[in-house]
Image (tube, rainbow, N blue to C red):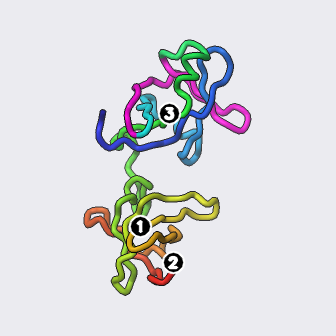
């Protein structure tokens, strides 16, 4: 299995009888998931198969995709629940001051006073702004708001500096 796989979404259902699957996308815009022609499909961190994207489109309020080698509804049903991943090097380079969530996970978080606030475990999309979930002495939820809260991200050093009180 290739290293550095990044989850872009998952298969959450089927559509019709010709092997189309319903897709939930974490990309922005959500149709961006169709920019990647080779999907690594995994369950619980174990790769099940690699699938080539034949077609993808918006369908109502969701997305649907047709994958090579998935000829019918029964084959599509076997894919429900699988994560859609791509290799990290398939993603475009982030612009200055922008970061992929996957690059922030695992960073050591410290506040301006030098207090250890733990490591970024995962992020939450709340709609208004993303939230860092850190785990250290306790779990913390820290808004991912650059300039106001997040002061510095140093990927090379593996640190993220925030203006956040350790009592929060």
Image quadrant in which the N terminus is located:
top left
Q: Which residue is mark 3?
A: 82
For marks 3 and 2 on the same chain, the one whose residue lies earlier in the sequence:
3
Residue 54 is covered by the magenta coloring: yes
Q: Which residue is mark 2?
A: 148
Question: Which is in the foreground here, disc 3 or disc 2?
Answer: 3
Q: Nearer the viewer, residue 64 or 12?
A: 12
Alpha carbon separation for disc pair 3 and 2: 37 Å
Q: Which residues are magenta?
A: 45-68
Q: Is residue 157 visible?
A: yes
Q: Quadrant of residue 17?
A: top right
Q: CA distance from mark 1 to mark 2?
A: 21 Å
Magenta region includes residue 38: no
- The residue shown at (48%, 84%) is 167
For label 1, count other residues whose C-alpha is less than 10 Å away and answer few (under 14), some (14-19) or many (20+).
some
Position of 99 with respect to 4 (left or right) is right
Q: Position of residue 124 (x, y in %)?
A: 54, 58
Residue 43 picture location, percent across and down: 44, 35
> Where is 53 relative to 139, above or below?
above
Circle 3/circle 1 CB separation < 8 Å: no
Q: x, y (%) of residue 59?
A: 69, 31
Secondary structure state at the residue bearing disc 1: strand
Residue extending farthest to the bottom is 113
Contact, CB < 8 Å: mark 3 with mark 2? no
Determine whether the residue tagged by mark 2 lies in a helix, strand or loop.
Answer: loop
- Residue located at (40% from left, 53% from top): 102
Q: In this figure, which residue is indicated by the disc labeled 1?
A: 135
Decide: is 118 above or below 112: above
> Whole-Å distance between the Cαs marked 3 and 1?
27 Å
């Amino acid at each position: 299995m290739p290293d550095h796989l990044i989850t872009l979404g998952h298969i959450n259902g089927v559509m019709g009888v010709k092997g189309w699957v319903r897709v939930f996308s974490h990309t922005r815009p959500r149709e961006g998931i169709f920019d990647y022609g080779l999907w690594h499909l995994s369950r619980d961190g174990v790769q099940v198969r690699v699938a080539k994207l034949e077609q993808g489109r918006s369908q109502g309020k969701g997305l649907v995709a047709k994958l090579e080698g998935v000829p019918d509804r029964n084959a599509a049903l076997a894919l429900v629940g699988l994560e859609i991943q791509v290799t990290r090097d398939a993603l475009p380079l982030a612009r200055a001051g922008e970061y992929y969530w996957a690059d922030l996970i695992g960073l050591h978080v410290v506040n301006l006073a030098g207090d250890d606030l733990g490591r970024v475990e995962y992020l939450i999309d709340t709609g208004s702004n993303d939230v860092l979930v850190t785990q250290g002495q306790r779990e913390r939820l820290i808004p991912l708001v650059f300039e106001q809260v997040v002061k510095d991200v140093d990927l090379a050093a593996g640190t993220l500096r925030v203006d956040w009180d350790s009592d929060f």
